Amino acid sequence: MNSPWNDRQPIYRQQLVEQHLVQKRRGRGMYVGDGARPTLLADERRRFRNEEWPRVLERIRRLGFSAGELLAEPSVATPTPVRPPDFGVASRRF
């Protein structure tokens, strides 16, 4: 299996090892580290809070929403499930 050369790939792998997100096992490959999920989740939460939330909050204020209005809209928070089309075909057992 020959994959195209990517000279950034070894650097990225090394960063994952240095951050303890993956573990190298000689002769066996790389495995996800035990603390990877909480570490990645904490990083994503920090990034959301610092980068995305200020824009969302500014838009909420610009549109004039109150906290009560946003929390009282169950149709927005819980989308209605979509049923797959029937196509008029009865289910068959094969």
Image: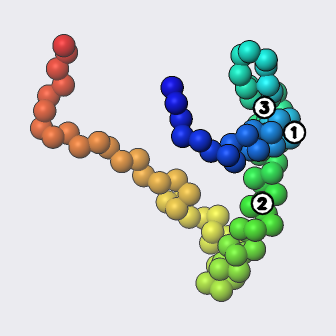
In the image shown, does 48 or 73 lie closer to the viewer? 48
SS at mark 1 in the image = helix
Mark 2 or 1, nearer chain start: 1
Alpha carbon of mark 2 to alpha carbon of mark 1: how far?
20 Å
Q: Is residue 29 left or right of residue 6?
A: right
Q: Which residue is mark 2?
A: 47
Viewer-nearest of labels 2 and 3?
A: 3
Looking at numbered disc 2 in the image, what kind of residue is underneath it?
A: Arg
Q: Which residue is mark 3?
A: 22
Mark 3 neighbour density, 10 Å: few (under 14) some (14–19) many (20 or more): some
Alpha carbon of mark 2 to alpha carbon of mark 3: how far?
21 Å
In the image shown, does 42 or 87 lie closer to the viewer? 42
Where does residue 34 sit, x and y in percent of width and height?
82, 27
Alpha carbon of mark 1 to alpha carbon of mark 3: how far?
8 Å
Q: Is residue 35 left or right of residue 4?
A: right
Please, is residue 72 above or below residue 78 in the view?
A: below
SS at mark 3 in the image = strand
Where does residue 66 sit, x and y in percent of width and height?
68, 77
| Image quadrant in which you'd find residue 70 | bottom right
Q: Which residue is mark 1?
A: 18
Using the rendered image of the protein, determine whether residue 38 is visible from the camera's viewpoint: no
Using the rendered image of the protein, determine whether residue 62 is visible from the camera's viewpoint: yes
Looking at numbered disc 1 in the image, what kind of residue is underneath it?
A: Glu
Looking at numbered disc 3 in the image, what kind of residue is underneath it?
A: Val
SS at mark 2 in the image = helix
